[in-house]
Amino acid sequence: MSGLEPGAMESALHRSMKRMVRCELESQRYRVVEEPLYPPTRRISWTAYRPDLLGLRSEPGVEEVAIVECETHPSMARFAAKNHASLWFEPEMSCEGSIRRILAVPRGRLHAVDLRLRRHWEIWVLGSTAPLERISTIG
């Protein structure tokens, strides 16, 4: 399958989910990159991982990275196997920095998500055109 563009074999639902979340992040002033093959700046690093979406937002004194995983059929075993814990971010010295983690799932699939993920991940339940529910982190 070499030669295919990233996302060439993804489902229409997965593309739609990424489009929805991207729109929401852009409305929150993030610059969004879809399935980046490598980190877009030297201050971000990861190993053997590629998020569905990566958002970057910088405001005076604060820099934030958002990573998004869109799971059409959530499987906690598959999700845990992703190397998202390898993500590392160092903000400018004069800024506070944070990493925002978002797991997006389609309506009707929340039951498959272990809500203990909320320690580190926001969980977004997506409808056909927009997020229906945003469940915030608890830590």
Image: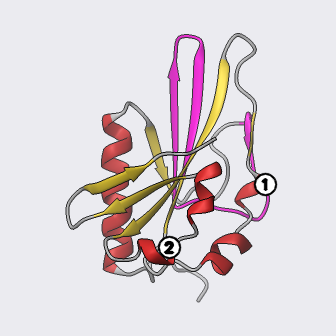
Residue 17 pos. (x, y %): 35, 65
Please identify, in this view, whether the residue under mark 1 or under mark 2 is nearer the observer.
Answer: 1
Residue at the spot 67% in from the left edge and 80% down from the top edge: 77
Residue at the spot 49% in from the left edge and 49% down from the top edge: 33
> Could one spot residue 120 in this view of the protein?
no
Instruction: Magenta stretch: give its range.
Output: 42-67
Is 32 on the left-hand or right-hand side of 12? right
- The quadrant the C terminus occupies is top right
Is 3 on the left-hand or right-hand side of 19? right
Q: Residues within 10 Å of mark 1 (few under 14, many from 20)?
A: few
What residue sits right under mark 1 in the picture? 86
> Could one spot residue 89 in this view of the protein?
yes
Q: Does the magenta-highlighted stretch encompass residue 48?
A: yes
Residue 76 pos. (x, y %): 62, 76
Q: Measure the C-alpha gap from mark 1 to mark 2.
A: 24 Å
Give me the disc on residue 5: 2
Q: Secondary structure at mark 2?
A: loop
Q: Amino acid at mark 1?
A: Ser
Residue 111 pos. (x, y %): 45, 76
Q: Residues within 10 Å of mark 2 (few under 14, many from 20)?
A: few
Q: Is residue 37 above or below residue 59?
A: below
Give the colour scheme of this rendering: secondary structure
Residue 43 pos. (x, y %): 73, 33
Q: Is residue 85 above or below residue 31?
A: below
Location of residue 36 by image quarter = bottom right
Location of residue 99 by image quarter = top right
Q: Is residue 59 above or below residue 114?
A: above
